[in-house]
Amino acid sequence: MSEIKGDEILLRVEKIKKHFMPHLTLAQSLAAGGKKRVVKAVDGISFDIKRGEIFGLIGESGSGKTTMGKLVMKLITPTEGRMFFEGEDVTFLEKMASKTYRTKVQMIFQDPYASMNPRFKIRDVLTEPLIIHKIKGSRDERDAMIAKALIEVKMTPPAEYMARYPHMLSGGQRQRVATARTLILNPKMLVADEPVSMIDLSTRAEILHMMKEVQRDMNLTYLYITHDLSTARYFTDRIAVMYLGRIVEMGKADDIIDNPLHPYTRALIDAVPEPQTGKVDIVKELPISGEIPSPANIPVGCRFHTRCPYAKPECSSLPEPELEDVGGGHLHACRRYKEI
Amino acid sequence: MDSILKVENLKMFYHTSKGAVRAIDDISFELKAGETLGLVGESGCGKTSMGTSILRMPTAPGRYESGRIYIDGQDVIPMPEKDVRKSIRWEKIAMVFQGAMNCLTPVYTIGRQMLETLHEHREMDDKQAVELISEYLQLVGLPSEVMGRYPHELSGGMKQRVVIATALFLKPKIVILDEPTTALDVIVQAQIINLLKKLKSTFDLSFIFITHDLALEAEVADRLCVMYAGKIAEIGPNSSIYGARGALHPYTEKLLQATPLLHKKVDNLSFIPGTPPDLIDPPKGCRFNPRCHKVMDKCRTDEPPLIEIEAGHQVACWRCTK
Amino acid sequence: MYKWFAAKRILKGVAIYAIIIFLLSALFNTVSETTQRSQIEEQIRLEQTKLKNLLPAQLMAFQAERRASLIKQYKLDRPFIERIVFRTIDILTLNFGKSMNIKSSKGERDVASIVGETIPRSLILFSVAAAINIALGIFLGLKQAQRPGGKLDRTTSLVTMIVYGMPVWWLAMIIIMFFVYTLKLFPSGGIHSVPTPTGIMYFLDMVWHIILPLFTLIVLGFWGTSYVTRNIVLGILQEDYIMAARARGIPENKVLFGHTMRTAAPPLMTMAILGLLGSIGGAIVFEGIFSWPGLGNLYWIAVQQNDVPVLLADLAITVGLYQMGLILLDLIYGFLDPRIKVGGKA
Amino acid sequence: MKIKDFSRALAEFWTEFRKSASGLIGLGILVVSLLVVIFEPIILPWRDANTKWRNIDYWIDNSAGAPPAWTNLFAKEKKAVTTRLESPGRVESDMEGGGKLVTLTFPYSFTADRAPLDLIFRATINGDVPVTVNVDRPDGTSIELASHFEQGLSNQGIRVTVNNEAKDSTFAFVKQFLSDETLSSMSSGTLEPANIVFSRADAAMAGKFAALKGDYKLVVKAMVFDTANSSIADPFFVVSGSASGILGTDDMKRDVFSGLLAGLKWALLIGIMTSAISVIVGVLYGITSAYFGGVVDSVMQFIYQVVSSMPLLPVLIVVSAIFKPSIWFIVMVMVLFFWTGSVMTVRSMALQLKEETYIEAAKALGSNNRRIIFRHMLPILIPYSFASMALSVPSAIVYESTVSLLGLGDATIVTWGQILHDAMAGGAVLNGVWWWIIPPGLLIAVMGMTFAFLGFAMDKILHPKLQTR
C-alpha cells in the first residue's frame, strides 16, 4: 500500500454538509422572535487528502473550517454527504468502529494548555489514550510507549517531563506533549486546528518544524486548519480556501498564493501584512468591504457576491458556481475569474 | 519634530505576594508629533503595562517606582487623579484597550456611552453632541443608527470601530492602540488598519501601536520599539529595521526570521528557544542572554546600555557596542 | 421582543403552578377526601335535625340518598385521576370549600375568604421589609466592594457568616422576650390593638405593632443581599469596560453607580428577590411568633386545629405567591438586561 | 498514586484553608461538636435523656423551671442547687431478734440562702424493708423526717419525698420553737418541710426563711429483717434545688443541658445527611443535564424548574402536619427539594467544562461519556460542591427546627427545635425563662455559623470568581 504513497487517497470527503438547528433557551428563542434559523456551518464540501500530504483549510472565523475539522474527527456527524477513509465509508460508524477510527485519525487543538486536563500529570495525559483504547501493558511497558512518543516530539529526556503538570511547561512544550499524545496510538492522520495561533511568534516555528519532522518520521497526513495564510504557505502542500461553509478555491499552496483566481482568495492575500519596509504611508487597496455574513443567512447565488467587488447581477441570480478545474489541480468557484 | 510624549527612566512594578514583578524597568523613549511608534515583544514583556502606565492608570497592584512621563511637556505622574481625568486622559491621550469587544458596558447603548464621555469633557447640548458622535461614527465607517444599539448587537469589527471612534472624538493628540486587531480576521484587520491610517493623517495624530505581530507593525509604525522582559531591546526607524540595514538586536533579528512570509517560500523558519524570563527575578546581565544565539561572556554579567548606533536607531546589545 | 418574553414567561409560570397543584392534590388526596367525607356526614346530620317525625327506615333512606347525592356532587365517585384533576381545577379557581373550625374575621367558614383576608397583611409586612433589606443590602454591598478586604468588608462578611444560620423566628422570640416582656415597650403581637382605634390612630397603632416584626426581619435580612452584591459588584469591577470607562474620564461615582450598578442590576435583582422568596419559609413561623395574622400565622392555627382544608388552601396560596414572585423576578431580569429586552445574540 | 494525588490536593487545599481564620474557627467548632457526639454517653448528665426525654417519671426529682446553677454567682440570694447524693456511708449492725439494721449516712453541706425544694430518697428494695429518714442538723438537733414501708417489693424502687411524707414530723419539730399564738394559725399542711429542715431553729422559724448553713447528715435507717431474701440497694438522695445543672430545667423538670446535648447529634445528622445526599444528587443531575444537552437538558431543566418553584418550608410543614413523619422521612422530603440548590451552578460550570478543549480532546481520543463525566468532569466539580454542601447544612438544620417548633417533629427523638417548641408552649417567652429559649436557638445559630465559616472559606478557595446567571 505504502508504495503508492503520494497518490493514494487517504481521506475523501464528498458533498459534506453540516447544518445546525440552534438549540435555544427560552430567552434566546424569544429574542430571535420565535424563528429558528438553520446555521449552515458546512454547506456541501468535497475534497481528497492524499496519504502523506499536508492539506490546509483556510478561512475566516465563521467560514466553517473548525466544523469541517470536527466532521473529519467524527466529533459530530454530517447532515448530508459521505466520508471515506482508506476507501472505507466512515460517514456513520458504530460505536466500536468509531473507536477504531479514532486510533487512525487524531487531533491537535488550538490551545495546548486547554487541551490537557490541568489536574493530570504529563504521564496521565499520555496514558489516557492507552487506557481508552485498552492497550494492555504493564506500567513499565506503558511508560516506554510514553517515552517513545515524547522522544518523537523532542522532549528529552522523557522521564523528566512525565511527572510534571501542564502548567509547569512552556506553550511550545505543551503543544509537543499534545502532539505526543496523538502519536501514541500510531495514527495515520492528524487534524490540527490552529495549532500555533495561541503560541508566541518566537516559538511558533519551532512547533511547525517539529510537526513536519514527525510527519516525515511517521508518514503522517495532516489536515491543517488555520486562518493564517502565511503559516499555511510555509507548512502545507495544498490549500482549500473556505468561505461561508463552502470551498471557493483549492490547489497547491504555491499556486493559490501566487496565482489566486477567486476574488475572495485575492482579498485574503492582499489583507495579509508583511514585514517589509515602505508600507507605512500606503493605504492598502482592499477589494472587498464589509464583514462575513452570518452562516444562518447565506446569500443566494454565489455566496460571496454581497462582498465581491466584481459582482454582476448574474452572480446573485444564477445558481451557485461549482468548483471548476483550471488544470494542475487548481480549482475555483468563480464564474467570472477570467474577466477579473 | 517636537516630542509630544516623553518617557524618562520609567519604572513600574507590580507588587504581588511573591514579590515585585519588574514589568517596566527603566524605560525611556520619545514620541514625536504625528508619528506612530510600534511597541512589539512577546506576551508578558510589558507592552500593555507600558500603555496603561502612559495613560497614568497602571493596573492594580502596579505602582510607579520612579521616572517621569511628560505629556505635552507636563509630567503627569505627580498630578492629582482629578486633574489627570479632567485634562489629560482622553483630552490629550486616549487608549484603545486590548480586547476592545469587552470595553463597552453591555447595558448601555453605544450612544449613551459616547454621550456620557463627551459630557464629562465638553460643555455641549445634546443635539450638538449627537451630531459630533454620528460624524465620528461615520468616520469609522459606521451608520449613526449604531448609537441606539447595545454592544451585543454589534460584531467584533463594529465594536472595534466604536471604540476607535470613542478614542478619537475628543481629538486627543496621542492614541495608544493595544492589539487593536488581534481578535479580528485578516480582512477586517486590514480594514481597521486602513481606517487608522486615514484617521491619523486627517487629525494629525500620534499613535503608540502595541502588538506582537512584526508584520503588522511594518505596515503602521514609523519607528519600532522592541521590548524584552520589561526593557527596551531596540528602538529604530521602520526603514532601517525592515529595510536593508536590518535589525541590530539578536532578539529582533530572530523575531523577524520567525515571522512567516506569504510571498516567499522558506524551508525553515527560525525560532527562539526557551521562554521569557520571570520578571520577579530576571537573569543577570542582558535579560535575553539565556536565549540568545550570539551570547558572549559579558552578556551574562553586565547589563548592556541602550546606545545609539546610527541616527535614531538605538540598541541594547554588547555585540553592537564593541 | 419583551412582550413575547413576558407573555411566554407568564404562561410557563402558570403551567408550572398547575403542575405543582396537581402533584400536591395527588399527594394530599386521601386526607382531603377523608375531610370531605366527614364534612358530608356533618351536613347530613345538620339536615336531618331539621326533619321531624321520620321513621327510622325513612331516616336511613334519607341519609343514604343524601350521602349518594353529595358524594356525586363532590365527584367522590369518579376514578382516582379524575378526582385529582377536579381538585386541581377547584384549587386553581380558588374553590377551596369550607373550613373545619376556623372562621374568618367576619365569621365565615369559606376557606377562600379565610385565606384571602390574610394575604394583604403578610404582603404589607414583607414588602416593607423587603424594600428596606434590598436597599440596605445593596448599599452595604457596594461599600464592601469598593474596598475589598477592608475593615468594613471584613466585619460585614463576618457578621454575614455569624447570622447565616440564625433562625429569624428564634431572634423574634428573644426580641419579644426582651422588648415586650422585660422592657414592656411594644405589644406582644397582632396587627391592631383591641379595640381597634380609628382615624389617624388606626395607622399609628399599626405602626406600633409592625415595628418589632419589621426590626427583626431587617436585622437578619440584609446581610445576604449585601454579600451577594459585594461579590457581583466585585466581579464587574474587574471587567475591561469598567477600566475603559474610567480611562475615558468618567468620574468614579458614575462608574460605580452607573456602569457597575446598571450591569449588576439584573443578577442583583435576581439574587435579592430569590433570597427574599427563600425567606418566605422562615416567615411562616415568624408570623406565628408575632401573632401577625398573615398567611404564616394561619399555618400555626390550621396545624393546631387540624383544619385540613385551610392548611391546604394556605399552601396553595403560598405556592402561588411564590410562583408569582419567580415570574416577577424573571420579568424584571428581562427588563433590565438589554440582551433579552432588545434581543439579538446572547 | 491516586492516593498520593489526593493527599497532595488535600495538602494544597489545607495551605489555602489555613489562611482563613474564620474557616479554622468553623473547623474547630465542628471537630469539638463531633467529639461531643462521640463522647456523649460519658458527658451526658442525664444518661437516659435520649430515650426518656418525654418520660415524666424520669425527671420527677428535678424542680421545674429552675435556672442554671451558675446564676447563683450573680444572685444576691444563693439558691440551693439540685444535687444527687450518692455512695453514702453504710453501716450494718445486727438487730435484736435477727435481721440487720442498715444505716446509710449522706453528708450534705448546705451553703445557700434558699432552701432546696425537696429532699428525695430513692433506693431499690427487695422484700419487706421499712426505712426511716432522719436528718442531723449542724446545730445538733435532728429530726426524724419520715418512715416508709412498702410491702412485698421485688427489686423495685422506692421514692421517699420529704415534702410529702415529712409534713407531720417537721410540724412537730417546729412546734418546739414557736409560740402558741403563731402555732394556732398554722397546720402541718401549709408547712414546707424542706424549708424547716434547713431553717435556723428559733421563734421566727415559720416566718421568713433564714438559712442554717453547715454540714447536714441525711441518715436513712433500713431494717432488713430477712437478710436472705430482702435487701436494699442503689440508695441515693436527691436534693432538689431551685437552681439546677448547667442550663437549668424546663417546666417539665427536664434538664435543658442534657436535651441540648442529645439534640446535637440529630442536628449534625440532619444537616450533613440532607446536604450531602442533596448535593450528590444535584451534582450528578447538573452534570447529566449539561453534558447530554438537547432534549435531555430541556426535560431535566423543566423538572428542575417545577421542583424549585415550590417553597420548601410550607410544603414540609403541611406534609409533616398531615403525615406525622419520622425524622428520616423529613430528611427525605428535604432532600427532595434541596438537590435543586446546586444544580444551576453545577450545570453552568459543567457547560463551561464541556466546552473545554481537554474534554473535546478526550472525545477525540475516543473516551466514552462515562469516562469523560467521571474522570474529567466530576473530579473538578466535586470539590466545588463541598462548599455548597457546607452552606446548605444550616438550612437543613433550621428547616427541621422550624417543623419541630410547630410541634410537628419526630417525637421519638430530641431536637433543638422541639425544645423550643416546648418552650413556646410552656410560655417561656412570656415568663422570661431565658435558659430554655436562648441556648437551643443559639446552638442552631452556632451550627449555622460553623458551617457558614467552613463553606465561605471553601468557597473563597474553590470559586475565585464564579457567578451564576
Image (cartoon, coloured by chain):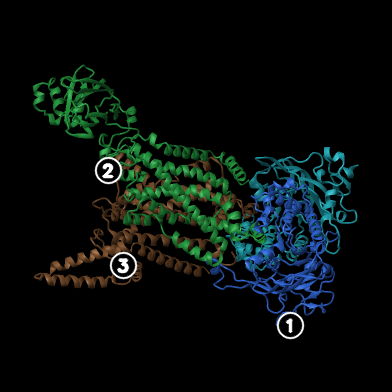
Q: Is residue B248 left or right of residue B51?
A: right
Residue pointed to by mark 3: C95
Total count of labels: 3
* Residue reaching furthest to the top: D140
For mark 2, what is the residue?
D426
The hue in which chain C appears in the rendered picture of the protein: brown
Closest to the observer, C123 or A23: A23
Front-most of D165 and D229?
A: D229
What letter labels the chain drawn in green? D
- Please state which amino acid type lies under the numbered disc 2: Gly
Q: For mark 2, give the secondary structure.
A: loop
Location of residue A61 in the rendering, given as x and y in whole percent from the top left corner: 70, 65
User: Is residue C68 toward the left or the right of residue B26 in the image?
Assistant: left
The amino acid type, in three-letter code, at marker 3 is Asn
Q: Is residue B319 visible?
A: yes
Q: Tell me, by letter, which chain the rendering colours blue.
A: A
